[in-house]
Image: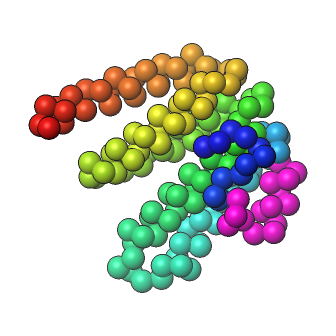
Amino acid sequence: MTLSPTTPNKFYNDLTTTEKVTRGVCTGTIDLWVLFISKIKTSAAKEAFKNYPEDSEEEARDSYVRERIANVYELAGDFAGYCGGSNVIWQEFISYIQSWPATTPSALSSKNSRLRTIFQAALTIPQRNLDEIWAQYSSHEKVSDCCAEPLGGLA
């Protein structure tokens, strides 16, 4: 997450021409970003089935959809996350990542790292509900610390 509109994330390179035009219109407009995120959420599953048609590729499809949606939230954070009212995007992004399954220690670590990055980016921006985001972040760090303690003793 760069939080700098001059350096788009890796997702920007994969955008279609229509999406690039939409991105240009949406810069700083929270309502349009929310609509754009909604569009990507609905199209990601279709893209995943197109790219991974076999039933045995369900895990790859799920991973593709998760990353595609997370990347569009990241893009929205980079381009509009600093604007008034962006707390809607940040809260949705945090909730979305929190909903990811973490079945392995590696997946849990990746999820926690991503959440930490999102929380830290969101907390640097003056916005509504900052106290709520801070409380979620504090809770997340406490849980992460509790889970890390037993692992640290094994080393």
| Left or right position of 134 against 6 | left
Q: Nearer the viewer, residue 124 or 52?
A: 124
Instruction: Locate residue 149 relative to residue 117 in the image: left or right.
Output: left
Residue in the foreground of this view, choosing between 150 and 32: 150
Image x and y of residue 23, in percent:
80, 54
Q: Residue at x 18, y 36 (%)?
A: 151
Q: Within the magenta stretch, is there residue 21? A: yes
Identify the image quadrant of residue 109.
top left
Q: Residue at x 46, y 70 (%)?
A: 61
Asked if 105 appears above or below 48 in the picture, the reply is above
Magenta-colored span? 12-26
The vertical placement of 128 against 72, above or below, is above
Q: Nearer the viewer, residue 140 or 151?
A: 151
* Residue 96 magenta-highlighted: no
The answer to whether residue 121 is visible is yes
Image quadrant holding the N terminus, namely top right
Residue 48 lies, in percent from the top left, at 53, 72
Compared with 147, 35 (above or below) is below
Q: Residue at x 82, y 39 (%)?
A: 28
